[in-house]
Amino acid sequence: MGGAGGKKYMGWWGHMGGPAQKGIVTYMLSPFEQKLFAGAAHNAVFNTARRVTSQIPYVGVAFGLGYFIYTSAKSKHAFLSSKAGHAHAEGGEH
């Protein structure tokens, strides 16, 4: 809790006992003067659109692959459920 030599107590964090700082300017705005939601709707719309369009390549590829698998399985199921599909599955013609 002391300095380099440890001979003098300098204080705890935030109260180190050193010289006062100079040249630091702090600006503050009253909470009643702030516009909390200024531009929130505008920013939300355009930020959402930007984020959605950036994800289209990833989601689009996955959706396309899933749709291809779904349509292939559906058509194969329709064929195998038909009379021709039953005949094909049994290995002969009836």
Image (tube, helix red, strand yellow):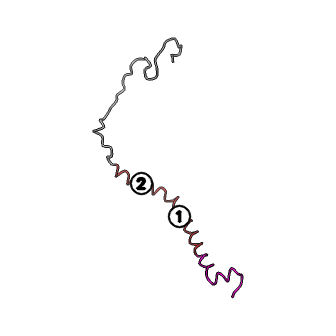
Q: Residue at x 47, y 16 (%)?
A: 10
**Crowd tier of the residue under label 2, counting other residues whose Cα lies within 10 Å: few below 14, some 14–19, many 20 or above:** few
Q: Position of residue 92 (x, y in %)?
A: 71, 84
Q: Please indicate whether residue 80 sits to the left or right of residue 22 in the image.
A: right
| Residue type for callout 2 | Thr
Give the dominant element type of the magenta stretch: helix, strand or loop.
Answer: helix
Q: Position of residue 43 (x, y in %)?
A: 37, 50
Q: Residue at x 30, y 35 (%)?
A: 29
Q: Position of residue 13 (x, y in %)?
A: 46, 23
| In the depicted structure, whether residue 49 falls above or below residue 6 | below
- Residue interval drawn in magenta: 75-94
Q: Which residue is mark 2?
A: 48
Q: Residue at x 47, y 55 (%)?
A: 54
Q: First in sequence, mark 1 or 2: give its number.
A: 2
| In the depicted structure, whether residue 49 falls above or below residue 74 | above
Q: Residue furthest right?
A: 91
| Residue type for callout 1 | Phe
Q: Which residue is mark 1?
A: 63
Q: Residue furthest left?
A: 33
